[in-house]
Amino acid sequence: MNSINNGGAYTVVARVAGGATSFPASGSGNLDMHASKYLGDFQFCETTGREDLIVRQLVVYVEGSLQANDINNWTLIDSEGNTIAMGLTEIPYVIFDLSDTYRIPKGICRSLTIRGTPVDGADRTLRLHIQNDYNLTVIGYNTGASIAPSSFSDQAASDGFWRIKEGSLEVNLAAGSPDGSIQPGTQEAVLAIFELQALGELLEIRKIDLEIVESSSVLADRLTGLVEIRSQDDSITYLQLSADTLHLQRISDIPDVSRFDLNHYILFAPRTKTTIKVVATPKITATSAQTYKAKIGNFSAWRASTKDFVDLLTSNYASGNTLTVQAPFFADINTIGYQSLNLPPLSRQLIINVCD
């Protein structure tokens, strides 16, 4: 590239990136999928004070195992936070064509930031470089002549190593999950409501461990009929078990890492929430000594980007609130007198007829 001696000149330097310092990147170098992420920052300084610079094109070399479709929306952003170019991917290069729109005032430094959105390629790596001075197309604002850096070496941040994370699962107790008491014999009572969120990539949950932890093992106090995991609107039944299923009702609060095949897989995209609820029926004979607490964990999931099966939340189960059986109150009308119940006359007469 030809340089103009009586025009401007500049330097370009890779700035601190805040990622990992080597491959395989971990910790701060991990990138979540499906979210715009900072990937690199290069500072341009006009050093002569003679004329402004126009940056026409920037070609970035991508070191690592990244493939062409792993990152979308390569974006070049100026010091004011404006998007000034979108990248064209030709791995191992990303090309930013600025079309004569970006100007660096003489004697001033400006930083250009690169961001991108990982959409695939779990566990693949990248690090951004400007490898050569010919990867830059810069001209003088007044002279229109091509200008080369005053000196140049391969520019890449020492802490600019990145790795696209594998998908994971976050499970939280929903704000409206039941708390307090439960009546014996309540048909299809909701024991707990949970919110599931996929992080990093599309997940398909195929197995789950459901446990109902109880304070009493007396048969009269236990659940009866079916225990189900449903969608919040009851339109989908993900899991349906007999209350007598082995390992379902438990006294111990320590998970036994058993799990059940779902009748309907739970499929959700990254950063979207799916709400599920645990539904069951306490026996009519359940006493006030009994409590119920629903717990879920030990998920088996298919990760669409990583293309593997993974066990998630194998020990730290998500737990519902403890629900305590509250037996209904029955009063002896002959003892307290129906007058004290403050009932309307018709209801009083019905009570008298029943009790007589």
Image (cartoon, rainbow, N blue to C red):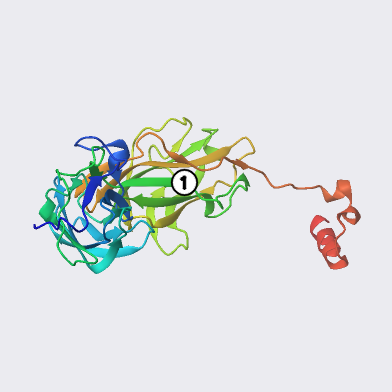
Say above or below: 246 vs 74.
Answer: above
- Residue 88 is situated, as x and y percent measured from the top left of the image, at 17, 63
Q: Could one spot residue 104 in this view of the protein?
A: yes
Q: Say what amino acid the circle numbered 1 marks.
A: Asn
Q: Residue 224: x and y, percent?
A: 49, 47
The picture places residue 298, in percent across and down from the top left corner, at: 34, 40
Query: Is the N terminus in the top left, top right, bottom left or bottom right quadrant?
Result: bottom left
Query: Is residue 205 at all visible to an observer of this figure?
Result: no
Residue 117 on image: x %, y %: 28, 56
Residue 323 falls in image quadrant: top right
Q: Secondary structure at mark 1?
A: strand
Residue at the (55%, 46%) spot, across then down: 283
Q: Answer left or right for 187 relative to 339.
A: left
Give the quarter of the image for residue 95. bottom left
Q: In the displayed image of the protein, which residue is found farthest to the left? A: 1
Q: Residues within 10 Å of mark 1 (few under 14, many from 20)?
A: some
| Near-viewer residue (343 or 66) | 66
- Against 202, is 296 above or below? above
Front residue of this view, candidates 74 and 337: 74
Name the residue at 55% across, 42% down. Answer: 321
Q: How many marks?
A: 1
The quadrant of the image that shows the C terminus is bottom right
| Residue tagged 1 | 172
Q: Nearer the viewer, residue 348 or 24?
A: 24
Q: Is residue 227 above or below residue 89?
A: above
Observer-nearest of 82 and 216: 82
* Residue 316 horizontal side relative to residue 214, left or right: left
On the picture, is 102 further left or further right than 280? left
